[in-house]
Image (spheres, grey):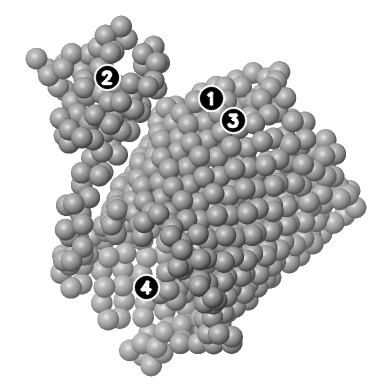
Amino acid sequence: MSVRFCCNPLGRSFAGDLRCQTPSEGDQPFASSPFAHLIPQSHRRACEGFVQRFPKNNRRRRSRWEILCILICLMFQATGTWAAADGIKPIGQINEYLRLMGELYGSHETWNFFRPDPATNNNNDYGLWAARARLGALLTTPYIDGYAQAQYIGLYSLPDDAVASPGGPLGLGGAYFLANQSTNASNVFLKQVYLDFKFSSLGLPGALLKIGRFEFMDGMEYTTGIGKFDGLKRARIAQRLLASNVVHVGRSFDGFTAVYDRPGFNVTAAGIRPTQGGFTVQGQKEIGDINLFYAALTSKKDVLLPGTEGRLFYLNYEDKRNTQAVDNRPAAERPRLDNQNLNLHTIGAHLLTLHPLGSGSIDALLWGAYQFGDWTNQGHQAWAIAAEAGYQWTALPFQPWLRALYFRSSGDDKANDGTHKTYFTALPSGRAYAKLPFYNLINMQDAFLQMIVSPTPKTRVTIDLHHLSLSNSSDLFYSGLGPTSRSGAFGYSGRPSGGKSDVGQLVDISFTHTLNKHLSWRFYYGHAFGGSVVRNFYQGKKDADMVYIDFSLVF
C-alpha cells in the first residue's frame, strides 16, 4: 500500500509502504521512516536512542531530529565511498579542459533568543532548516578560463511570529521571514558567471583580469599553501569588510578584479557592486546603487620579515539606495541615501606572523583601519583595531592552541556635532566574527580567549569566551550583516544603549569534523549572558541560546 510519510519537515509527502502515524502511535518514530533501512544497524540504534529522548507529544521536534539523524548517519556511511575516490582524478573532470563542480549543504538551527516584554509577535524559541545546492562548470584554457555556477537555496520552517513589535527580528529566523515574507522560501539563481583572462602568454606572468559575477573577500588576495598560516588569515583577517559568505544565501559581486601576482608581492584591485542575498533568497538581483572600489598591496610571507606577511588596503564605499541610514540621531534628522548618500573611504593594514618556538609555534596579528568621508549630511571619521596572539603546543596530545584576542571599533559620542564617528563594516561575512550574531563589529569592544584542540587530525574543537561592551555608551547597540537588498532595510539596525556599556558575555563551542576532502560536518552551541545594554531592551528574557548542526559535501 502506498501512502504518505508524515514526518517530513519540508511539508512534502513521500510514497512508501508505511502508514502515517498519529501522535498517539508515535512510539517508534525512527523506525517509521522510509529511509531507516538505509542506515547500518549500529548507527540506527544510536539514532533511535537519541530521537526517543524527545517527548512523544512534541511530534514536530521529534520528526526534525529524526530526519537530521538519518542525514548524519547516511553521511557517515558515505565516508568510505568518498574516501576511496581520494586517489583518483577529481570527481566531475570531463576532460582536460572541462570540469563540473558542486556542493550540497544542509543545516538545522535551534534558537532561544532574547525576548522583549511587553511586545507582540515575540516568539523567541523555534527551529529552522536550510538547504543549499550549487552546480558549476569550469572551462580552462591557456589564455582564458570561464566559470558558471547556479545555486538553489531553501529556507524552511521559518517562524512567522518572531519579528517583535517593538524589538525587531528575534534571531535569524525572524530576519529570514521578514526579508522573504514566507515560512518556506526558496529560489534558484545564477551565483557566478565570469571570464578570467590570463596574460602570461603576452609577457605578463601573474597578471589576471576577471570580469563578470563572482565571489570576493578582502584579506585573501593570495594564499601561502601553509595550512595553519592560511587558516589564520581566513578566520581572523579576511572578510572584515567584503565577503560572499553571508549566512546561508550568500552574496556575489558584479564587476572586475585585476591581479598582478609575483613571488614577493601581490597587487589586487576590484571595481564591484554587490548582489542581493544574505537574508533574502532573491540573490539574482544586483544592488546597483552600491559602488565599491577595493585595492590591496600584499607583501608575501617571509619577504620583509621571516614568517611575516603584511598588507595595505583601501576601500571606497558609495551607497545611494532608497533607504535611510541608521545612526544615533533621531530618525527625522537622518536623510535618505538617495538624497544624501554615503561616500566612505577606508585605509588600513595588517601584519600576520607565525614562528616555531620551543615545543610549538607562536602567532600574532595586528589589523587596523581608519575611515573618512561623508555620512549623509555629516562628515565621517572612524577607526577600528584588532590585536591577537597565540601559542600552540604541537608536541602535546590534542595540540592545544591558546589565543588571546582584542577588537575595538569607534562609536559616536555626540549625535549632532556634524561628524559621524561610528565605524562602518561595509559588507562583511555573516558569522566569521560573531557566530551567535546578536551583535556585530560596529561600536564594539570584544575581548576574548580562545582554546582550540584537535583530538584527531581531522577533528577540531574550539571554545571562545567573549566579554562584549560598547565602545561608546552614547551611541547605539548595533546588529546586522550589511546591505542585503536594493531598498527597504539599511542592512544594520541599532537599539538605544540606555547609557550603559556592558553588552554581556558569550560562550562559543564549535566542533568540526572533516571526514575527507569532500565531506565535513559541524556542531555549534552558543550562549549569551545579556549585560545591562541587552537588559535595557530585552526585558522578557535576558539570555540567548543557539544550536546548529550542518554538513557540507563538495566535489
Query: In the displayed structure, does residue 335 sit left or right of residue 429?
Result: right
Q: Are marks 1 and 3 in contact (CB under 8 Å)?
A: yes
Q: Which mark is residue 125?
A: 1
Q: Residue at x 69, y 53 (%)?
A: 447
Q: Are marks 2 and 1 in contact (CB under 8 Å)?
A: no
Which quadrant holds residue 312?
bottom right
Q: Residue at x 32, y 64 (%)?
A: 147
Query: In the displayed structure, does residue 310 sit left or right of residue 106?
Result: right
Residue type, label 3: Phe
| Crowd band around label 1 with a 10 angstrom C-alpha radius: few (<14), some (14–19), many (20+) | some
The residue singled out by tag 3 in the image is 113
Q: Earlier in the sequence, mark 3 or mark 2?
A: 2
- Residue 26, image x and y in percent? 28, 13
Residue type, label 1: Asp
Q: Earlier in the sequence, mark 4 or mark 3?
A: 3
Report if residue 134 is visible in the image: no
- Residue 277, image x and y in percent? 48, 46
| Crowd band around label 2 with a 10 angstrom C-alpha radius: few (<14), some (14–19), many (20+) | some
| Crowd band around label 4 with a 10 angstrom C-alpha radius: few (<14), some (14–19), many (20+) | some
* Mark 4 to mark 2 CA distance (whole Å): 51 Å
Residue type, label 2: Pro
1 or 4: mark nearer the eye:
1
* Mark 2 to mark 1 CA distance (whole Å): 23 Å
Report if residue 530 is visible in the image: yes
Residue type, label 4: Asp
Q: Secondary structure at mark 3?
A: loop
